[in-house]
Image (tube, grey):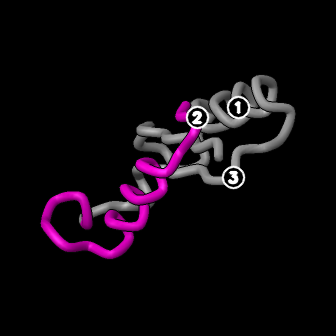
Amino acid sequence: MTVVVVGNPKPMSRTRAAAELIAEKLTGIPPEHVIDVVDLGAGLLGWGDPKVAEAKAIVKAADSLI
Protein backbone atom coordinates (compact mmCIF):
# COMPACT_ATOMS: atom_id res chain seq x y z
CA MET A 1 0.00 0.00 0.00
CA THR A 2 1.38 3.38 -1.01
CA VAL A 3 0.64 6.36 1.23
CA VAL A 4 1.37 10.02 0.55
CA VAL A 5 1.68 12.42 3.50
CA VAL A 6 1.58 16.15 2.74
CA GLY A 7 2.44 18.85 5.27
CA ASN A 8 1.77 21.98 3.22
CA PRO A 9 -0.60 24.33 5.11
CA LYS A 10 -2.59 25.03 1.93
CA PRO A 11 -5.32 22.46 1.17
CA MET A 12 -4.98 20.68 -2.20
CA SER A 13 -1.54 22.26 -2.71
CA ARG A 14 0.87 21.85 -5.59
CA THR A 15 3.03 19.91 -3.14
CA ARG A 16 0.23 17.38 -2.77
CA ALA A 17 -0.22 17.13 -6.53
CA ALA A 18 3.52 16.57 -6.98
CA ALA A 19 3.64 13.90 -4.28
CA GLU A 20 0.67 12.07 -5.79
CA LEU A 21 2.30 12.20 -9.23
CA ILE A 22 5.57 10.82 -7.82
CA ALA A 23 3.70 7.98 -6.12
CA GLU A 24 1.91 7.11 -9.35
CA LYS A 25 5.11 7.26 -11.42
CA LEU A 26 6.91 4.98 -8.93
CA THR A 27 4.15 2.39 -8.55
CA GLY A 28 2.11 2.67 -11.75
CA ILE A 29 -1.11 3.34 -9.81
CA PRO A 30 -2.44 6.27 -7.75
CA PRO A 31 -1.65 6.10 -4.02
CA GLU A 32 -4.17 4.18 -1.94
CA HIS A 33 -4.19 6.93 0.70
CA VAL A 34 -3.28 10.62 0.76
CA ILE A 35 -3.02 12.19 4.19
CA ASP A 36 -3.09 15.97 4.00
CA VAL A 37 -1.96 17.14 7.44
CA VAL A 38 -3.93 20.38 7.06
CA ASP A 39 -7.12 18.27 7.12
CA LEU A 40 -6.21 16.91 10.56
CA GLY A 41 -6.30 20.45 11.96
CA ALA A 42 -6.59 20.99 15.69
CA GLY A 43 -6.76 17.24 16.28
CA LEU A 44 -2.97 17.25 16.04
CA LEU A 45 -2.71 19.43 19.13
CA GLY A 46 -4.14 16.97 21.64
CA TRP A 47 -4.44 13.29 22.40
CA GLY A 48 -7.04 10.81 21.25
CA ASP A 49 -8.34 12.40 18.07
CA PRO A 50 -9.88 9.62 15.94
CA LYS A 51 -8.84 11.19 12.60
CA VAL A 52 -5.23 11.44 13.78
CA ALA A 53 -5.33 7.86 15.07
CA GLU A 54 -6.64 6.66 11.70
CA ALA A 55 -3.92 8.58 9.84
CA LYS A 56 -1.27 7.09 12.13
CA ALA A 57 -2.56 3.56 11.53
CA ILE A 58 -2.52 4.10 7.76
CA VAL A 59 1.08 5.35 7.86
CA LYS A 60 2.16 2.42 10.03
CA ALA A 61 0.61 -0.06 7.58
CA ALA A 62 2.19 1.51 4.48
CA ASP A 63 4.56 -0.46 2.27
CA SER A 64 5.68 2.78 0.60
CA LEU A 65 5.54 6.24 2.14
CA ILE A 66 6.02 9.48 0.22
Residue 1 percent across, percent down from the top left = 65, 47
Q: How many marks are shown on the rendered structure? A: 3
Label 3 sits on what residue type? Glu
Question: Which residue is under mark 1?
Answer: 23
- Does the CB distance between marks 1 and 2 fall below 8 Å? yes
Residue nearest the observer in this picture, 53 or 19 = 53
Q: Check residue 61 for magenta coloring.
A: yes
Q: Which mark is residue 32?
A: 3
**Residue at x 13%, y 65% (from the top left corner):** 46
User: What is the magenta range?
Assistant: 43-66
**Residue at x 53%, y 45% (from the top left corner):** 62
Which numbered disc flags the more N-terminal residue, 1 or 2?
1
- Answer above or below: position of 56 versus 49: above
Numbered disc 3: secondary structure? loop
Label 1 sits on what residue type? Ala
Is 62 placed left or right of 45 in the picture? right
Label 3 neighbour load within 10 Å: few <14, some 14-19, many 20+ = few
Question: Which residue is under mark 2?
Answer: 64
Q: Where on the picture, by quarter, is residue 23?
A: top right
Label 1 neighbour load within 10 Å: few <14, some 14-19, many 20+ = many
Label 2 sits on what residue type? Ser
